[in-house]
Image (tube, helix red, strand yellow):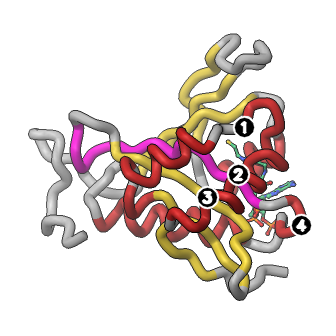
Amino acid sequence: MNQRFVVRRVGRRDLDRILEIEAASFGADAYDRNLFAEYTHKCGGLFLVAELGTKVCAYSIAAISPGRPGKRAELISMAVAPAFRRKGAASALMDSTLRRLRRRGVARIALMVKVTNQRARDFYAKYGFRKLRRVAGYYEDGADGLSLAKDLGQKVGQAGYPLGPPANS
Ligand SMILES: CC(C)(COP(=O)(O)OP(=O)(O)OC[C@H]1O[C@@H](n2cnc3c(N)ncnc32)[C@H](O)[C@@H]1OP(=O)(O)O)[C@@H](O)C(=O)NCCC(=O)NCCS
């Protein structure tokens, strides 16, 4: 059953807990502290955590692609602490990320997922991500990656910017 996760922007105080979630989720492939610290600076309001009470249960990081403002974004990473999976934490993060990207006028979000990561593939399929291509040997362990994307229902103008009112945040 889905629980009431509160989604908010990451803070420096969250990094220890995020590293725990990361190690439990990705093992040898886990990102390190320096990379997360860099993302807190670079990704600002698109590096999010989901809390239940005061416990951080999950994180996600998205970034708007440089050089094409307002057009495309990438989901860099997402993970839920094992004890909190299948309770709607990733959905709460994805819903918030998609809302934030639409507000910024982003027209498409893309990501890469390991071909063997079936639960993540099921999750992204539920959100309507579609397969763009398979990238042989993308991961360090030699596994292939699947490049997925989802259109956010915003028309892109000739200059590459969305049509309609400007983003307000
Ligand atoms: C993939 C992951 C982020 C999903 O997080 P979650 O909080 O468990 O997902 P949710 O509870 O929001 O699930 C939403 C939907 O995704 C799909 N889904 C999620 N986990 C699934 C699983 N284990 N098996 C099948 N479908 C699954 C289901 O459609 C689910 O809806 P339902 O519960 O109503 O059937 C989580 O399993 C995780 O952190 N995995 C390890 C890290 C990882 O692989 N990250 C993605 C890297 S690309």
Q: Is residue 150 visible to us here?
A: no
Q: Quadrant of the C terminus?
A: bottom left
> Which one is closest to the eye, mark 4 or mark 3?
3
> Which one is closest to the eye, mark 2 or mark 4?
2
Question: In the rendered structure, are the residues bearing label 1 and label 2 in contact, judged by CB atoms less than 8 Å apart?
Answer: yes
Image x and y of residue 18, in percent:
67, 57
Q: CA distance from mark 4 to mark 3?
A: 19 Å
Label 3 vs 1, first from the N-terminus: 3
Q: Which residue is mark 1?
A: 30
Image x and y of residue 85, in percent:
83, 64
Q: Is residue 46 left or right of residue 36?
A: left
Q: Which mark is residue 11?
A: none
Q: Which mark is residue 15?
A: 3
Mark 4 closeness class: few <14, some 14–19, many ≥20 residues within 10 Å = few
Label 4 vs 3, first from the N-terminus: 3
Q: Which residue is mark 2?
A: 19
Would you say residue 77 sits in the magenta stretch?
yes
